[in-house]
Amino acid sequence: MRARLALSISHQVCELREVVLRDKPQAMLDISPKGTVPVLVDLDGSVLEESLDIMLWALGKNDPEAWLKPEQGSMATMQALIAECDGFFKYHLDRYKYAQRYENTDARQHRAAGSRFLEKLNQQLNQTPYLFGERVSLADRAIAPFVRQFANADRAWFDQQPWSDLQDWLTNFLNSGIFHQIMEKYPQWQSDTVGPLFPTP
């Protein structure tokens, strides 16, 4: 999701190959043996296998909304917050949302631990509508997809928490035009077909 956000906002047209992870095409595994998405293959043959790397690659080519230049703070402070999301928060998110996949896991304990990160975001959003000022930055778009996952694990519970600024921030993301664009469904890619162009030029 966040790779598509950056590809879209930076107007990087690419051939999209929609895959079903339970039916991974051999062409994907040949390029990226770890078998996870997203995977981006550049024109020079270089391969990017992490969504944040794809975001930085795309925005490095074109950053029309200045996601890499936050209104407040710095690139380093944004990266630190994203790293906390991708590390601490994602660890607890996975064990809250998919507790059955982990032995001896208490989903509520991991929900409580993950909530500490969300409380931190809410406090940051008390001051401005976005994490680093009055406009969207890389941190907002890199973190929002994971907050969405956390919220959707038990939306009734999430909506009852005293995080009004965070809840408004998430609602704004879910109502945004770019979110609806990247969530468009595409048919599963077949090895004998050419994928659709994304974003639509």
Image (tube, rainbow, N blue to C red):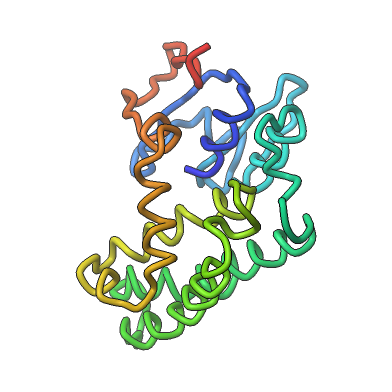
Q: Residue at x 37, y 69 (%)?
A: 164
Q: Quadrant of residue 54?
A: top right
Q: Is residue 134 above or below residue 159?
A: above
- Residue at 36%, 82% (x, y): give it: 103
Residue at 53% x, 75% y is 123
What x and y, as percent, mark residue 31? 62, 33
Q: Is residue 50 above or below residue 84?
A: above
Q: Nearer the viewer, residue 99 or 86?
A: 86
User: Residue 138, image x and y in percent?
Assistant: 64, 48
Report which quarter residue 101 is drawn in: bottom left
Percent across and percent down for residue 18 are 41, 29
Seen from the viewer's position, the closer of residues 153 and 193 is: 153
Q: How many marks?
A: 0
Vertical arrangement, residue 90 with respect to residue 58, above or below:
below
Residue at the image position 53 percent from the left and 33 percent from the top: 28
Q: Residue 35 or 41: which is nearer the viewer?
A: 41
Query: Is 147 displayed left or right of 14 in the figure?
Result: left
Q: Is residue 201 left or right of residue 184?
A: right
- Residue 142: image location, x then y, percent: 57, 52
